[in-house]
Image (spheres, grey):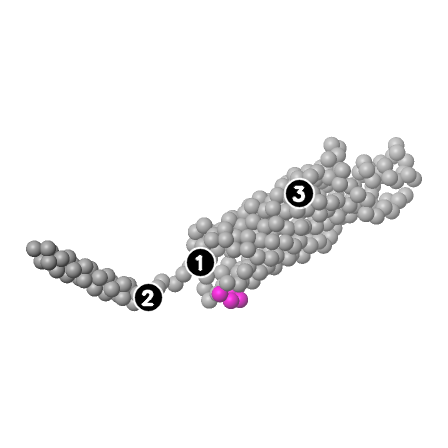
Amino acid sequence: MFNKYKHISMKKISTILILSLFSFSAFAQIPKLPQLTSYGFRLGLTASPTIGWVKPEQGKSDGIALGFSYGLMGDFNFAPNYSFSTALTITTMNGKSTEVDPTYIKSLDLAANKSIPVAYDLKYKVQYLELPLTIKLKTVKDNGRRYYGQFGLSNSFLLSAKQDAVSSTAQLDNVKISDYTKFYRAGLIIGGGGEFDISANTSFVAGLTFNNGFTNITTDKNRDVRNHYLALNFGVFF
């Protein structure tokens, strides 16, 4: 009796093993669908020349000035065509303006008449640590290329601030104005560009972003100054 049941059990086990092997073999022969994207985290390096300008309420913009941004960038892919994108960069935001009686600058201008308003041609040289929080909307990859649009919030934390000032009575260079510049700056980011595969795990990124500052950067209660920039973005994801 025991041998009879043992023989039946062995036949069942053998049948299950044979069917499993056939199933696995058939599944292995099914062609794989093309992969639309790689989910997960991607890290890369970025470098961006910038064109900056300032807009004072109590004065006027007086031209653009070049700057530079560099650091790390990262994409968190949470859907085939969507990514949460951030970075950690050192960014210089420069710009030129003409303003009347900026408090700290005029206090250093010993030849100025304190009772008469004085117009100063200023050049802002402000450096921030930037931590943007944005969303990327991407096209489906085609022949190693895909394109994206980007939108989100710029968070900038002051590292240093200097200013050149010229008036009819003074010429001041690299005046430190960190104590008169707010620590935090917020802005709105909008941009777009493309990613181009170099190898299986490496891609080159190129794009353009507009960073529109919407907070006052000066601590002077009598002044309101906002800075903005365009960046030509280059980077490599690894």
Q: Position of residue 79 (x, y in %)?
A: 43, 51
Q: Position of residue 30 (x, y in %)?
A: 30, 65
Locate the C terminus and report the quarter of the image it occupies.
Answer: bottom right
Q: Residue furthest front?
A: 2
Q: Position of residue 201 (x, y in %)?
A: 50, 63
**Label 2 residue SS:** loop
What amino acid is found at the position of numbered circle 3 in the picture? Phe
Say if the magenta span includes residue 178.
no
Locate the N terminus and report the quarter of the image it occupies.
Answer: bottom left
Residue shown at 74% from the left, 32% from the top: 221
Q: Position of residue 145 (x, y in %)?
A: 49, 63
Mark 3 sits on what residue? 157
Circle on res. 66: none
Q: Dot 2 surroundings within 10 Å: few (below 14), some, or many (20 or more)?
A: few
Q: Which residues are magenta?
A: 196-200
Q: Nearer the viewer, residue 116 or 110?
A: 110
Horizontal arrangement in the rendering, residue 142 relative to residue 111 (left or right): left
Circle on res. 37: 1
The reply to whether callout 3 and callout 1 are in contact (CB within 8 Å) is no
Residue shown at 10% from the left, 55% from the top: 2
Q: CA distance from mark 3 to mark 2?
A: 51 Å
